[in-house]
Image (spheres, rainbow, N blue to C red):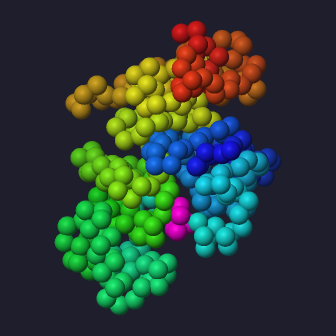
Amino acid sequence: MSAYFEIKDLLVGFRTFEETRPVLNIERLAIERGETYGLVGESGAGKTVLALTILGLLPKPAGVIQRGEIWFDGEDLLKKSESELASLYRGKRLAMIFQDPMSTLNPVFTVGQQIERVIEYHQGLRGHSRTQKAVELLEMVKLADAKNILKKYPHELSGGQRQRVVIAIALSCGAEFLIADEPTRNLDVTIQAGILQLIDELRKNLRITVLFIANNVSLVNVFCKRVGILYRGKLVEEGPSPLVIREPLHPYTQTLISALPRDRSERPRFSGFELKPEAPQGCPFYSRCPIGVEFCVQQQPRLEAVIRPEHKAACFLARSR
Ligand SMILES: Nc1ncnc2c1ncn2[C@@H]1O[C@H](COP(=O)(O)OP(=O)(O)OP(=O)(O)O)[C@@H](O)[C@H]1O
Ligand code: SF4
Ligand SMILES: [Mg+2]
């Protein structure tokens, strides 16, 4: 029996002239209904590719799903046709917020025109009831003076206001699963906190499930019950957020956490790496790992429970430290 949302044995690659280059290789990632799961990884780790794969939006023909299953409420999304995904899932049950709100908003239409078009398309509302619904949605995302905002063009809003509009559009059709792909990446720290707070409130009030993608582990600590650390397309650690942050098991997670500033005035600290050769048959982190041993070159470590059943790491030496 699959979880509410569950990825099984997913392998995704991008075609080049010579080969299909693997980009994602996830053995299992499960999310419970109503949970916020944080997925953290550096640039290029495969976070957006994962989000696009879930929604059936992987760029084709370059992107290839080589194998795997993505279970959502009892159905394998990878077995759905494009028309089923478009008519029954995307927007209706699964929604996504992209890291740059301007990639969702069209600069030549007002906020009202854009949000009302979505309401009309999905809910068939027109005229006053359509505008009323748009106002309600903007109020839901805590935008003051919603009627006035409807008349504005995206460039007339602040970054935080734009991202709130995007969240309103994403949730306008009652989606129950929200993928938030670094929704605060380009925002100031104080504005970030407001958006994260909003997503958390919406999760509770609308009873939605959230896959929250971030490139910074500090963002997931407060709002995500569990966190997964993605490195070169693989989950290298997973567990309850406070535990992963307090007692990281994988050397990569330890590096991420030691790079966090201790207070706001301090700049991020990065521990130095002595780069070693890559280990194509072995651990993907070997070339950057400060404690890797010869054995790590020969085999790929699997994501397995270490000490506690709910805290997993893909590292041969995790148990011995
Ligand atoms: N259309 C594409 N064609 C070929 N390769 C791609 C394409 N899109 C992404 N990739 C590759 O897939 C890998 C993962 O990219 P992805 O955009 O998922 O990273 P990310 O974790 O979202 O990074 P960021 O934090 O910068 O958004 C990268 O190596 C990237 O070069
Ligand atoms: S398996 Fe080896 S190389 Fe990989 S993270 Fe663990 S110690 Fe480092
Ligand atoms: Mg991305």
**Residue positioned most to the top:** 320
For residue 159, what is the image quadrant?
A: bottom left
Residue shown at 53%/34% (left/top)? 229
Q: Residue furthest bottom?
A: 127
Main SS type for the magenta part? loop
- Residue extending furthest toward the front: 1
Residue 151 visible (yes or no): yes
Q: Quadrant of residue 215?
A: top left
For the N terminus, give its image quadrant. Answer: top right
Relative to 222, does residue 88 appear above or below in the rendering? below
- Image coords of residue 28 (percent x, y): 65, 38
The verdict on residue 92 being magenta is: yes
Residue at 58% from the left image edge and 13% from the top image edge: 319
Q: Which residues are magenta?
A: 90-95
The answer to which quarter of the image holds residue 81 is bottom right
Image x and y of residue 206, in percent: 39, 59
**Frontmost residue, 108 versus 161:** 161
Q: Residue furthest left?
A: 145
Question: Which residue occupies the foreground of this view, 55 or 43?
Answer: 55
Q: Is residue 253 left or right of residue 22?
A: left
Front one among 73 and 9: 73
What residue is at 65 percent from the left and 51 percent from the top? 71
Residue 141: within the magenta? no
Taking the image as drawn, is residue 181 in sight? no
Residue drawn at (32%, 83%), measured in percent from left and top? 131
Residue sitting nearer the eye, 96 or 102? 96
Query: Is residue 136 positioned above or below 17 on the image?
Result: below
Q: Is residue 283 above or below residue 40?
A: above
Residue 84 image offset from top left, x and y in percent: 67, 70
